[in-house]
Amino acid sequence: MFLTKECDYAIRVIRSLSDMQQKTAKAICEKEVIPLQFSYKILKRLEKAGIISTCRGTSGGYRLSKPADSLTLFDVVNAVNENMYVSDCLKPSAECPHQAGGNVCSVHKEYCRIQNLVVSALREKTVSQVF
């Protein structure tokens, strides 16, 4: 599936942090109904992508590194799911048995069209426009 549960949770994490306030993982998870253990993986990926920052220590937590109006849904989804293809055949490593002599399969062409539409739609709005 293109938009995984992990992508959905990542968008909900950003929604929770969109007020630019620092929050603990527990507070984010309670507000957004996300399993705490699963959230750490998502938070780590969002931090690696530079979308959130971590404050360590007893009064630590997470906060957005950028305002929500500068982040698109694509930014968030891509941070947690870098290989987001609508079909496995779009992956660079994929080998299609229907591509003979350098011709691209007609189904592959359609998947490419759909992929481009989805990526464009995710880039179209900032997360603040969605929230």
Image: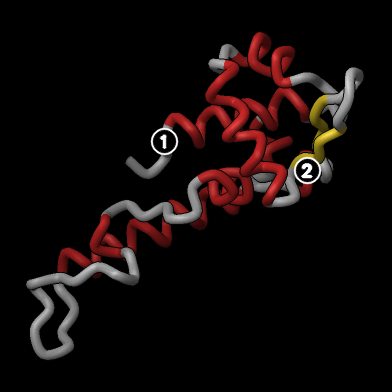
Placement of the N terminus among the 4 image quadrants: top left
115 vs 25, nearest the viewer: 25
Q: Residue furthest front?
A: 57
Give the CA separation, mark 2 to mark 1: 23 Å
- Name the residue located 59 percent from the left edge and 35 percent from the top edge: 42
Q: Position of residue 11 (x, y in %)?
A: 60, 33
- Name the residue located 36 percent from the left edge and 55 percent from the top edge: 85
Within 10 angstroms of label 1, few (less than 14), some, or many (20 or more) residues? few
Q: Position of residue 19 (x, y in %)?
A: 84, 26
Please indicate, yes or no, whether residue 21 appears anywhere in the rendered image.
no
The amino acid type of the residue labelled 2 equals Asp
53 vs 115, nearest the viewer: 53
125 vs 4, nearest the viewer: 4
Count of picture labels:
2
Q: Along the horizontal axis of the image, is 53 left or right of 43? A: right
Q: Residue furthest bottom?
A: 101
Q: Along the horizontal axis of the image, is 123 left or right of 48? A: left
| Residue to which mark 1 is pinned | 4
- Name the residue located 75 percent from the left edge and 50 percent from the top edge: 50
Which structural element holds mark 2? Answer: helix
Placement of the C terminus among the 4 image quadrants: top right
Quadrant in which residue 104 is drawn:
bottom left
Q: Which mark is residue 44?
A: none
- Name the residue located 71 percent from the left edge and 20 percent from the top edge: 25
Quadrant in which residue 60 is drawn:
top right
Please indicate, yes or no, whether residue 57 appears anywhere in the rendered image.
yes
Which structural element holds mark 1? Answer: loop
Q: Position of residue 75 (x, y in %)?
A: 63, 50
Q: Measured along the vertical axis of the image, is residue 78 above or below residue 91? A: above
| Residue to which mark 2 is pinned | 69
The amino acid type of the residue labelled 1 equals Thr
Q: Earlier in the sequence, mark 2 or mark 1?
A: 1
